[in-house]
Image (cartoon, rainbow, N blue to C red):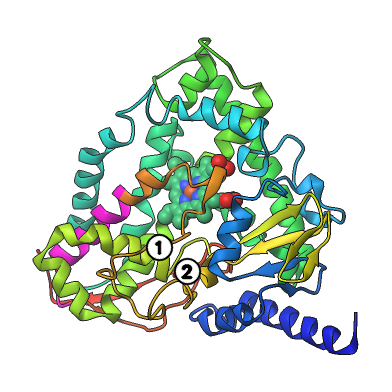
Amino acid sequence: MTTSDTVKSAVSADLMRQVADAENRHDPYPIYARLREKRVNLLADGSYALGRYADVVGLLHDPRVSSDPHHASNPGSRLLVDNGPFIQRDPPDHDRLRSIATRYFGPPVSPGVVSGQEPEILSFVSDLIDALPASGEADLVDHLAYPLPVSVICGLLGVPKSDEEQFRAWTEDIVRGLDAEQQQGADDLIRQRQQAQVAMFGYVTELVQRHRAQPDGSMLSRLANDHAGQQMTDGELGATSLLLLIAGHETTVNLTANGVLTLLRNPWALDRLRADPDWVIPLVEELLRFEPPVQYLPNRVALADIDVDGTTIPKGASIVLLVAAANRDPDRFAHPDRFDPDRGDIEHVGFGSGIHYCFGAPLARIEAQASLTAFAGRLASPRLAADPPPYRPSPVLRGPLHLRVTYDKRG
Ligand code: HEM
């Protein structure tokens, strides 16, 4: 590496540290724009970050790129667990586990599971809005964005809602440590993440046993008791349950909260949604592009030397795919920094792409659409009490911690 290369990689490493820095959480997009200037950014820990749309999509579909951290030549703390969940597995195990899970979540075997949630989602959202003060101020993270996805995923999986406080604490520790390597205090974050992971794995394993003893028709019960076709081992069942419980609510809360925030920053969009509730469909897609709840995928691994524009990502290197940067790539989207649900072409990578494309996307869409339509329709003259709001700690799963909104009247 020449001196100039070293200087360039120091710049990239610093930019990625800035992305992780809580000071920049409210607006990381100018930093992503700088990371996009180079097709390949070498980071301080030896991993490679890419932010151009074509590169991110290309690598998401590239069989030389693994989702299994065990393949990293220097896995460090990335080596999370043996027999991890299918989000961290490659074919054929990934495909086998995902297809078993899909049997109880979507077509062709269970076509009505997600769409069947819709009436309950609408009624739950309505109850949540009814419970807000008649006028004044409310935190729409605590009272709208968070309770809906938690309640839905608990109901679907068969997780007692009374355990929410406990698994919320574990989930927070796991999520905060997702990209510990780029953050300050990495050792503590990693230790807390690992402890939470062990504890939560114990919890779901016990839960699965309870479902074996007393089946109730929920997804975990069906996964644990169905003997038709292929089955998961107990370890795989625990890892899948943990994945679904965390992924099922930690991201959707941010989509809804980012949506409320974006609507309040763009009053024309709020008026338009009020007048035309069906407009929520392109609105939510544009939100997934403009403010993606999953900002980047930190743990891919090169299974072979991969050449990108003359730079070799060596076999065994970790790869960071910057979803949020790709979604605002001017080579892919016109006026990428403009929030424009009418842009027509919104092929974002907010749900990923390729074989790991989000398993829960149809559910997340219904939840966010229901929450945002109700918010627009029922709160008169809503205003942000603080802009920017405080953010949750994770740079990876990014969204407001609280969103205090004042309004004249609840309808
Ligand atoms: C707005 C909400 C959501 C967003 C933005 C989101 C985003 C993503 C992204 C970007 C991926 C790809 C990860 C990768 O390639 O490594 C993914 C995968 C996944 N998501 Fe979601 N997700 C959301 C909601 C959900 C929900 C509600 C569930 C569960 C019901 C869920 C379950 C999963 C699972 C299991 C995977 C792994 C898929 C695989 O490895 O094949 N997600 N999600």
Query: Where does label 1 land, which residue?
Result: 288
Magenta stretch in the rendered image: 366-381
Residue at the front extreme of this rendering = 310
**The C terminus, quarter of image:** bottom left
Crowd band around label 1 with a 10 angstrom C-alpha radius: few (<14), some (14–19), many (20+): many
The answer to whether one can see residue 290 in this image is: yes
Q: Disc 1, ligand 1: is the CB inside 8 Å?
A: yes
Residue at the top extreme of this rendering = 227
Crowd band around label 2 with a 10 angstrom C-alpha radius: few (<14), some (14–19), many (20+): many
User: Circles 1 and 2: CB distance less than 8 Å?
Assistant: yes
Which element carries disc 2, helix, strand or loop?
Answer: loop
For image coordinates 52% across by 69% down, the residue present is: 326
Badge 1 or badge 2: first in the primary sequence: 1
47 or 202: nearer the viewer:
47
Check residue 82 for magenta coloring.
Answer: no
For image coordinates 67% across by 48% down, the residue present is: 196
The three-letter code of the residue at mark 1 reads: Leu
The three-letter code of the residue at mark 2 reads: Asn
Q: Position of residue 143 (x, y in %)?
A: 32, 59
For image coordinates 56% across by 58% down, the residue present is: 57
Image quarter of residue 403: bottom left
Q: Left or right: 30 with respect to 271? A: right
Q: Which mark is residue 327?
A: 2
Q: Position of residue 354 (x, y in %)?
A: 54, 47
